[in-house]
Image (tube, coloured by chain):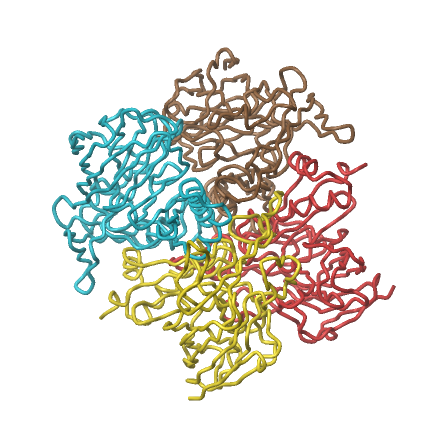
Chain colours: A yellow, B cyan, C brown, D red
Amino acid sequence: MSLHRLTEKVQGQYHYTIGPYAKPVLTIKSGDTVVVQTLDAFGGKIIDENTKPSRVLEFPNVNPLNGPILIEGAEKGDALKVTIESITPRGPQPRGTTCLIPFFGGLTGIPKSPTLQDPLPEIVRKVNITEQEILWSDRIRFPYDPFVGTIGTSPELDSINSLTPDSHGGNMDLPDVRPGNTIYLPVRSSGGRLFLGDCHATQGDGELCGVAIEFPTETTIRVDLAKNLNIKWPRIENKDFIMSVGSSRPMEEAAKIAYMDLIEWMVEGFGFDKYEAYFVLTQIARVRLGNMVDPNYTIAASINKRYLLP
Amino acid sequence: MSLHRLTEKVQGQYHYTIGPYAKPVLTIKSGDTVVVQTLDAFGGKIIDENTKPSRVLEFPNVNPLNGPILIEGAEKGDALKVTIESITPRGPQPRGTTCLIPFFGGLTGIPKSPTLQDPLPEIVRKVNITEQEILWSDRIRFPYDPFVGTIGTSPELDSINSLTPDSHGGNMDLPDVRPGNTIYLPVRSSGGRLFLGDCHATQGDGELCGVAIEFPTETTIRVDLAKNLNIKWPRIENKDFIMSVGSSRPMEEAAKIAYMDLIEWMVEGFGFDKYEAYFVLTQIARVRLGNMVDPNYTIAASINKRYLLP
Amino acid sequence: MSLHRLTEKVQGQYHYTIGPYAKPVLTIKSGDTVVVQTLDAFGGKIIDENTKPSRVLEFPNVNPLNGPILIEGAEKGDALKVTIESITPRGPQPRGTTCLIPFFGGLTGIPKSPTLQDPLPEIVRKVNITEQEILWSDRIRFPYDPFVGTIGTSPELDSINSLTPDSHGGNMDLPDVRPGNTIYLPVRSSGGRLFLGDCHATQGDGELCGVAIEFPTETTIRVDLAKNLNIKWPRIENKDFIMSVGSSRPMEEAAKIAYMDLIEWMVEGFGFDKYEAYFVLTQIARVRLGNMVDPNYTIAASINKRYLLP
Amino acid sequence: MSLHRLTEKVQGQYHYTIGPYAKPVLTIKSGDTVVVQTLDAFGGKIIDENTKPSRVLEFPNVNPLNGPILIEGAEKGDALKVTIESITPRGPQPRGTTCLIPFFGGLTGIPKSPTLQDPLPEIVRKVNITEQEILWSDRIRFPYDPFVGTIGTSPELDSINSLTPDSHGGNMDLPDVRPGNTIYLPVRSSGGRLFLGDCHATQGDGELCGVAIEFPTETTIRVDLAKNLNIKWPRIENKDFIMSVGSSRPMEEAAKIAYMDLIEWMVEGFGFDKYEAYFVLTQIARVRLGNMVDPNYTIAASINKRYLLP
């Protein structure tokens, strides 16, 4: 069980697309731990509240990711089991950034759903972040509740930009990818090719304006290889629940994917009849909205493990 | 402050549509309490596990509602403030019903999103309900966590079937309409014309198969008139949070409606700047999926009151 | 075969909701003809280009309809067969109106899909209409290509506002409801209760800004009763094609409904195997987008009759 | 002006993803013509009506494309102007294939919108194709109306599977990409990197079951470079109309994209005021549904050139 450090220097060039074509930055063994120096979603370019996002951001070069990390022995048909061990802030204060970006977010026309209306104003907010809280204003402080916004494995042939979540994981913006929880990701290319980044210090359900409290971190993950765990969509687990994650448009499809996968998990992993699982989830499941702002929306469906006991 | 009893006998004919055309069953004053004998969503027609829903249900005569209740002095531009005081089960055991109905539910083709595939099997489950728990099976018991599935006020001109949620409330299937919470509903016709019914003993987020644990109840509500509280969509409040409710298709529109209304509430009720509200919700709001199975999907967005302090 | 005249005077009060509650204005026999004096969608309130729609329109009192017309002998399970015989303009020039209404239309945030952006400007255009053409500008003239924007029969229990298309017909804004074509509408209440109005002198597919060239007309229809023709959605027929109409949200559901109904028509009416119909439509069907701006979107799917020959 | 032949042999390995990573097969100059030997969407693997698609197709290796073709001098910010000159069938009869593939198509649950229902049956149909007609059955013959189903240029960083249409073009399944018409595609990487394939001998609007009459062809295209024609989405032009193409989910977004782009074209290319363009399209535009079965739906909006005259 080795410990690896994927510093900014080791990483070198960060990536804006998740696929089989970039050169690996690290090769690890199942069970190894990696400390990853992630950048914020803007690559640190929004340095103060006077910076215009539309001037400094150069699409598609946004949301930089660390990786790809190869896991020895990982082959198509396996899964990676990534446990988030800790997320600590790094860099000088104010470390946190949120902003309104023209034609981006949940309550504005966007290029894929355009309106003829004028854009909302560009506004940048920089905030101090400690391991206890986010100092939003004199009046409001948010608890420090960090998670990994973007994490995924490579598709077999495609390369998917780091803003889009799909069956490979990606930009799910799901707060359950948090310390203490384990995410399973499908292996579709040799070595799995794990990418991650885009940590958030806190985020509401849906990430309404499109930008959470973005910050650079030191994120520690442990990666295990689950041979032949042939999953179709990301899954999350902790001591209390199991959760399946769907990403699609329109939003109801993300919910359907998540629930369908959770039924399959209950059938294959816990011996449920499929209609029994359908009934039980109807009565007791919980749903989490990850994002309502990315090219695909993300919804997770979960069930408490107490209902899975034999 | 009077106490009224809207028994099955007083109700007489239950209603399957929410509008300005049915004869009122009760007229009350602001501040009065009403004990309502609700039927289950099937009007009690699914009596055992051998009953075929497709044989006994006669659309559009499903989901019977009590009402309309008139509130003296309520006029267009006001709101009703309905506090759910208690929900107790009634009727002989097994009181609870859930089932699979052909071409209805979250993981099947439906008439509005048809497929050429054969329907899922019809299955009925009858369960015992106490005020402590629902006895699902030898292995699984669900906590008793009741709420009102359908509650709404009359539109000005339209009459909307009791299966559809919209800006008037209706079949939201939102677990937050529970004892201890208060729901605000828009008054659009003289007297407000309140309808309610369709209580659930428990329900998971989204009401996946389309049918929660349906049961007949005695539901106690207190109704206050909020003059000139000109709301566009239902709102819910308790000691901890404020919540706005949107219902539409596709699902992202329900989320947008709920968030837009919550921003307006924060601006008008708590002095927020609209972009400040947009930012704060992005970081700390919570979203609840009510249903993903009705003619409109329902999503509620909420914020903890601690972030609203001056 | 009688001829009836449903003048403004005979109509008296126009209607803004389609349901079983309004008093009939006319009772006819199968095979009768009715000349209907329709108002424009604004009830004539937008009198010149300086009128602000947001000042003169009082929702939900927009899109006035003639009716209800009862057809003797029509009962639930039948269909009305309404042939559009002619549509002629009436009233003083400029008779035609189109406009931009705040937060209404295809390329703006709307109340059901809200944005925080400012509304588009209000703009009114009044145009002269003859039976040959619409004089849009010095540069552009559109051919006179009139049709009935809103036509429908009453639901069994509900009353649906005149802006919403659904399985009863309603505000489909489908150019194929034009002179020479026949539309079939389901009978769901005694007498059928036919409503119509909202004629357009021309309209592009989707009715992009939400307002076509609206105008008052004299519309002549012939109504036949099709006993036991138990249709679920509106259907249109002329000498060249048969067409099924779906209305829903999101738009793909409208397309699925239309195609599903067209398969059923081919199976029941023309002896096709259902998968053969599915294949043949895949290769040769045509789709028409009615509206992309109403509470439900409308899509029609059609097939040329030459592919239906035995 | 050279003529190039991109035969099966010159192509060698066909591609299943459109991106910047594959080795170019041909480099041409602006104005050159290329005769391309395309495969059918199944790479010829469905050889007869007894072949099970689910056995022989290996996702994601479906819908093979020719390319990438480099155009000298093409740089980010330019556009390729590809004129379809002719499409002729090749290969032994029966050359044409359509089929039902489990959990794929417009009227079935699919992985991104799953249902618990059983799949539709697998059915394969092989048909003879001449340059005059498709011999569907004794009773039905379809006119030969061929087009290119998939054509696109490389994204800057991503590689997108050949089944998905988006702003780069791709699997639009739009019958207007037919002989005589010209499609403009955005250049986002050096040389443009043009891919194409997936020709259809005929197709109905929406490609209902997901599979048109697929066939191998010899497709002749002429490629011109339009320097600095910085388009966002594919555009099509012929002597009669201009057309913009949008691809997204839900379907209404594809329509909004297409119309927004067409407004921009009318403003920048023909001197329209943007609201004038919005009004004119409302009255006279036409919409074509390309596909309702791919990961993004495709809709094109067009206007007849007679309304664009100065």
Name the spot of residue A209 as percent of width and height, x first. Answer: 51, 53
Q: In this view of the protein, which residue sits in the foreground, D253 or B167? A: B167
- Rendered view: C275 above or below B184: below
At 16% from the left edge and 33% from the top edge, which residue is drawn? B7
- Farthest left residue in view: B92
- Rendered view: D288 above or below D158: above
Indicate left or right for A113 with B209 as reference. Answer: right
Dividing the picture into quadrants, the one containing residue D219 is: bottom right
- Rendered view: A286 above or below B220: below
Q: Can residue A177 be seen in this snapshot?
A: yes
Name the spot of residue C11 as percent of width and height, x first. Answer: 48, 15
- Farthest bottom residue in view: A1
Q: In this view of the protein, which residue sits in the foreground, C239 or D84? A: D84
Name the spot of residue B132 as percent of width and height, x first. Answer: 15, 54
Q: In this view of the protein, which residue sits in the foreground, B149 or A15? A: A15
Name the spot of residue D289 as percent of width and height, x first. Answer: 60, 48
Indicate left or right for C91 with B209 as reference. Answer: right
- Farthest front residue in view: A138
| Number of marks drawn | 0
Q: Can residue C271 be seen in this snapshot?
A: no
- Farthest top residue in view: C9
Indicate left or right for D207 with A281 as reference. Answer: right
Q: In this view of the protein, which residue sits in the foreground, A110 or D159? A: A110
Give the quadrant of the C terminus of chain C.
top right
At 37% from the left edge and 25% from the top edge, which residue is drawn? C20
